[in-house]
Structures are given as structure tokens and as C-alpha cells.
Image (spheres, helix red, strand yellow):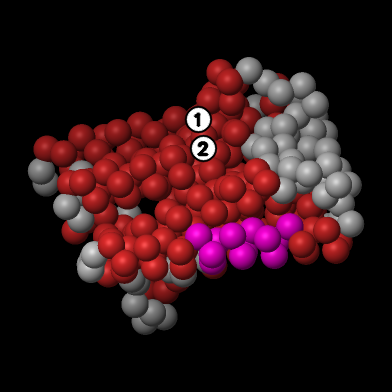
Amino acid sequence: MSLPETIANVVELALLVSGLIALFILFGSPAARARIAAPVLPFWEMRPLNFLLVVWCIVMANVAASVAAVQLLRLAAPLPGDTVRIVAGMAADLGQIAACLALRSPRLGLEAVPSAPAPPRPTRCWRGGTVTFLAALPLVELVELAWQSTLKATGVPLVEQDTLGLFIHAAPAMRATLLFFAVALAPVTEELVFRGVLFRYVRGRAPRWLALAGPALLFAALHQNLASLAGLFTLGLCFSLAYERTGDLRVPIVAHGLFNLHTALLVFAGVTK
């Protein structure tokens, strides 16, 4: 085992222990159970037709930005297919963010970044996001281990995510671009869509279990990787619970960014996920 792998494994063990401690503090201790409060996420006043319009606009912005970026690249110069895919993905994310920002019309009732009635200080967002990341980590890894063991036992081949494969084999400049995409851009886009729009709308209109499970399952399925499906589903549940409990979308955004950074660093250190 190389030195980077040894260091990564030690850090990973420390993070898992910290995550178990965070879970106990949040849910296991008598003090935590005594101070559990009702979720602060407010009901989203929006008619179904307007909600469908919002979803349609976000999807169209995703497709239009992606197609436009690919066409511009083809006009500029021939580029490797992996580069085109990365640029198209980044453009799609930027298109979705732009759509969410543009749709903050009072007539639609959409807030691109919903917050609690009294928005917490930025330091609290970072603290809440870090605690969410730590608490989610052991749950996700345990579920992922059980899920992948089940797939192996049934003869289903395990294929790594495309993004991880690109990150492993990319040149340094492209690896830095992928890291920015994974840590800074994708968390904002995905949390806006899956938590800020889908979960927030369904939460007050369906049974709580369905509101939690539906967006989390869609979030996992759209990553198009069977091996990571259960782990991503669990991660989506954790992010929705964090958003529900805090009412601040910045908390799952920070947690999501930290989780992606954690995965990228493990891959960079040669530790497979």
C-alpha cells in the first residue's frame, strides 16, 4: 500500500468515526431527542400548473445550454469526446441555475434559494453542511457496501461512474476542471433542483416518506450507475432531511460539495470507491 493510500485510509477512518459521533449527537443522545423540533421548511404556495411550468423551464434550459455548448465547440475546433461531454454537462448545470434564478417571479412563487424565516449566518451554514456530510458518510458507505455485495452475489457487474473514470484518466488541467464541476457547480445545481424545487414542492402535498424517497430516488437514478444507486439514494435522503430541518438550502449544498470533494480525493489518492 502506497503512502497516499495509507494516509487516505487513516483520514477515512477518522471521518467515519466523526460521522458516527455526529449521528449520535444529532439523533442518539437523550439531549438530542429532547430538543427535536418541528421542521422549519415552510409550505410552498404554488399551483400544480405553475410547478409543471417551472420543471419544464428547468429541463429546457438544461437541454438548450448543453446543445448550444456542443454546437459552439464543434464550430471552434474538433475536441475529444470526453471534453465535449464535460463542457456539455457544465453548460447544462449553468442553464439550470440560470433558469432557477430567472424563475424567482412572485407570480410563480419560486425562490431559487429558499431559506429559513430568519436566514442563519454563513458560519452556521458551513457548520450545518459539515455536520450533515459527516453524519451521512457512514450511512452511505454502509448502505453502499451492502448494496454492492448484493449485486456481486447475484452476478451483476459493478461499473464505476463515468465521471470517476474521467477523473482518473484525465490530464491535470481537465482534472482540475472536473473537480470544480463536482465540488462547486454540480452541488448547487442538483440541490436547487432536487431539494429546492422537487422536494420542497412535494413535501407539503404528499406523505412525508414519499416526499423524501421520490426526489432521492430520482437523484440517484439520474446518475445512471447501478453500483452507486443505493448509496446515492441514501445521500439524497440525508440532504432532504437537512434541508427540511434547517429550511436553508445552503446546508445540503455545502454537504454535497464536501461529499464530492471527499470522493474525488479518495480517487486521487488511489483508494477505490
Q: Which residue lies furthest to the left in this view?
A: 2
- Which residue is the site of mark 2? 255
- Give the spatial CA distance, label 1 vs label 2: 6 Å
Say whether residue 127 is visible. yes
Q: In this orientation, which residue lies closer to the viewer: 124 or 102? A: 102
Residue 95: x and y in percent read 54, 54
Residue 77: x and y in percent read 24, 65
Q: Which amino acid does label 2 sit on?
A: Ala
Side (left or right) of 18 relative to 116? left
Residue at 83% x, 45% y is: 109
Q: What residue type is labelled 1?
A: Thr
Let me know if residue 56 is in the magenta part. yes
Compared to residue 103, the image places residue 206 above or below, namely below
Quadrant where the image shows the C terminus: bottom left
Compared to residue 243, the image places residue 194 above or below, namely below
Which type of secondary structure does the marked residue at label 1 adopt? helix
- Which residue is the site of mark 1? 130
Q: Residue 140 carries which label?
A: none
Q: In this orientation, which residue lies closer to the viewer: 183 or 174? A: 174
Span of residues in magenta: 54-65
